[in-house]
Amino acid sequence: MLRKIFPVLLLVLGVFAAAQHAFSQTDPLPSWNEGPAKRSITDFVKRITTQGHADFVPEEERIATFDNDGTLWAEQPVYFQVAFAFDRLKAMAADHPEWRQQQPYKAVMDGDMQALAATGEQGLLAIIAETHAGMTTEAFTADVKEWIASARHPRFDRPYTDLAYKPMIELLAYLRANGFKTFIVSGGGIEFMRPWTERVYGIPPEQVVGSSGVTEFKIGPDGKPVLEKLAKVEFIDDGSGKPVGINRFIGRRPIFAFGNSDGDQQMLEWTASGEGPRFMGIVHHTDAAREWAYDRQSPIGKLDKALDEGLASGWTIVDMKNDWRTVFAFQ
Amino acid sequence: MLRKIFPVLLLVLGVFAAAQHAFSQTDPLPSWNEGPAKRSITDFVKRITTQGHADFVPEEERIATFDNDGTLWAEQPVYFQVAFAFDRLKAMAADHPEWRQQQPYKAVMDGDMQALAATGEQGLLAIIAETHAGMTTEAFTADVKEWIASARHPRFDRPYTDLAYKPMIELLAYLRANGFKTFIVSGGGIEFMRPWTERVYGIPPEQVVGSSGVTEFKIGPDGKPVLEKLAKVEFIDDGSGKPVGINRFIGRRPIFAFGNSDGDQQMLEWTASGEGPRFMGIVHHTDAAREWAYDRQSPIGKLDKALDEGLASGWTIVDMKNDWRTVFAFQ
């Protein structure tokens, strides 16, 4: 009898194996065109996940860090957190009639970016103080969630989170499927990102590193403890702050990092200078039709020195126009 | 034919199920005596992991935070990081003959704790500056690893990491097996803990929150970037700093927290005041024979206000002498 069962079993197992083979042949990065950028990613992942390969990296050391603005989602015409701050300020204006005569608030109400720029760093800090401080962390999280659910991007008339890049979401999932732990390391506010990064990128709050303000532990009016957000900068996670933030929050050096601007240069250098195999990637915004085209001269997401270093060092430079089949899922 | 295969299959499956049942009946906390402390832990975990139960908590929200000194490993006769600093200072003394006449160094060399105490906070900061700063993060990590591998505890003549509590190591593993993410939230130095917490507790570097000094990104003499440790305190992760650290590093409120001293009180309060089911635990050092007995009057690990609050609020107070069958694995 067993001799008759075995062929059946083998047949069943064979079907499973064929299905698995078909599955493993499915392109994990369908929004990436075939080319050197895509190949550099898949080649790297194959090398470091192949047992016995000289470049094999144990799973616990597979740390990947990604900038957010301009790398995982768009950042034009202004950083989305700035749009959030302006919207919040406008919503608060009803309770502040004096703002109609007072800078920098008047400039925001009037949409006068030149007048706003004239108020300089002082003006910006005043706006941050009004919109990002003087409340509990829980109240701020509720504000962010409400804005993310309701605000719409001026050019695309879509929720801002729809402007996450489909190829990068695929890349994050592909890395995780290959044993990586994926982190955000962004100049953006840590508490502005955490309420939605899990849903949009699959990155949980505890894997988000960002800029932060000081918070203070207090007992609230109902006797319950709260964390109060103060109008005081604690940490700027940009430029040389990125390796500092990586060391503080993660405590391991990434083997894979992606950025898009000079603010990511030190994170990429820090990644590049570790032992063993390394992957450094830069998103180059070259697609004015589907997204935006900007680099060396842009006031937002300026990519100049990091581009030179990336070209000289053989980092992967993603040409958005040619390397990405799809930019946004809705297109 | 199939009718004959089925009974065989069922038999095979039955053996598997029986084995699985036996496995699930194995006590996951064998170093805990049966009693209210152990029961409060297993009852809580059962409730929050049972689908359909009113207290069910989705896996991504199962965050557990543990103090380190006195909660996961011992802290007597001095915090082990202080022993590390003294040992480092003695090792450096050969290059500093002037220390023989100079406080606070002389006090450390002479083992004169009274003279050391007289140098106050200034003295302590000078020792930290010598032993924890003026080097790269990588050089410091190498120092810690070397000390952890070679130094021995004065009472037990064992490596310090042998003084990790077996019942707590079991508890960490039990929580992880039930979908929890386990974090350390300690007043100790973050870079002092990370080199060994994965091996000893199964907690990776990115899940360690602690006190830290400022680090600075620099290009080293060989052209490679380094992070230099400066003699400047950045963050003290103790007392009301613990909820602040939890918010900054984890970004979610724990549903399970364990401490042992007044420095953990605010972490426990922060945990207690969230929505839904909560577990708050305190290790009470009551076992002078196997470990140490101390609480309200102790200069190290003082447990006074948090004990009163824990007793009043029905937190789980672990009586080390009666609740732990084993304290250290080597005993």
Image: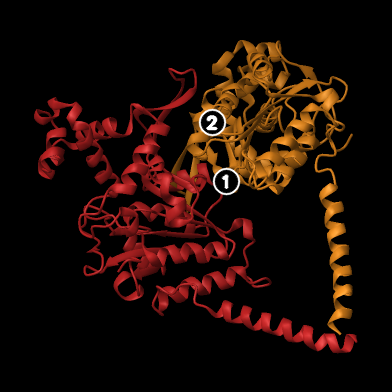
Chain colours: A orange, B red
- Disc 1 chain ID: A
Instruction: For label 2, count other residues whose C-alpha is less than 10 Å away and answer few (under 14), some (14-19) or many (20+).
Output: some
Name which quarter of the figure residue A211 lies in.
top right
Distance Cα–Cα, label 2 vs label 1: 24 Å
Question: Which residue bears the numbered disc 2?
Answer: A274
Q: Is residue A307 left or right of residue B314?
A: right
The N terminus of chain B lies in which quarter of the figure?
bottom right
Q: Residue at x 39, y 49 (%)?
A: B186
Establish if B327 lies above or below A307: below
Q: Residue at x 85, y 39 (%)?
A: A30
Q: Where does the image place residue B96, in percent across and percent down from the top left?
A: 17, 26
Q: Is the residue under label 1 in contact with that under label 2 (CB below 8 Å)?
A: no
Instruction: For label 1, count other residues whose C-alpha is less than 10 Å away and answer few (under 14), some (14-19) or many (20+).
Output: many
- Secondary structure at numbered mark 2: loop
Q: Most extreme residue toward the front, as rendered?
A: A3
Q: Is residue A73 in view from this perspective?
A: no
Toward the viewer: B11 or B281? Answer: B11
- Secondary structure at numbered mark 1: helix
Name which quarter of the figure residue B167 lies in.
bottom left
Establish if B196 lies above or below A33: below
Three-letter amino acid code at the position of disc 1: Glu
Q: Where does the image place residue B173, in percent across and percent down from the top left?
A: 50, 63
Name which quarter of the figure residue A16 lies in.
bottom right
Q: Where does the image place residue B73, in percent across and percent down from the top left?
A: 34, 57
Considering only order in the chain, which callout, 1 or 2, is on the residue closer to the N terminus? Answer: 1
The C terminus of chain B lies in which quarter of the figure?
bottom left
Task: Using the image, tell me which numbered label, if any, was put on residue A313.
Answer: none
Q: Residue at x 13, y 25 (%)?
A: B98
Toward the viewer: B78 or A133? Answer: B78
Three-letter amino acid code at the position of disc 2: Gly
Task: Using the image, tell me which numbered label, if any, was put on residue A206.
Answer: 1
Q: Is residue A5 left or right of residue A102?
A: right
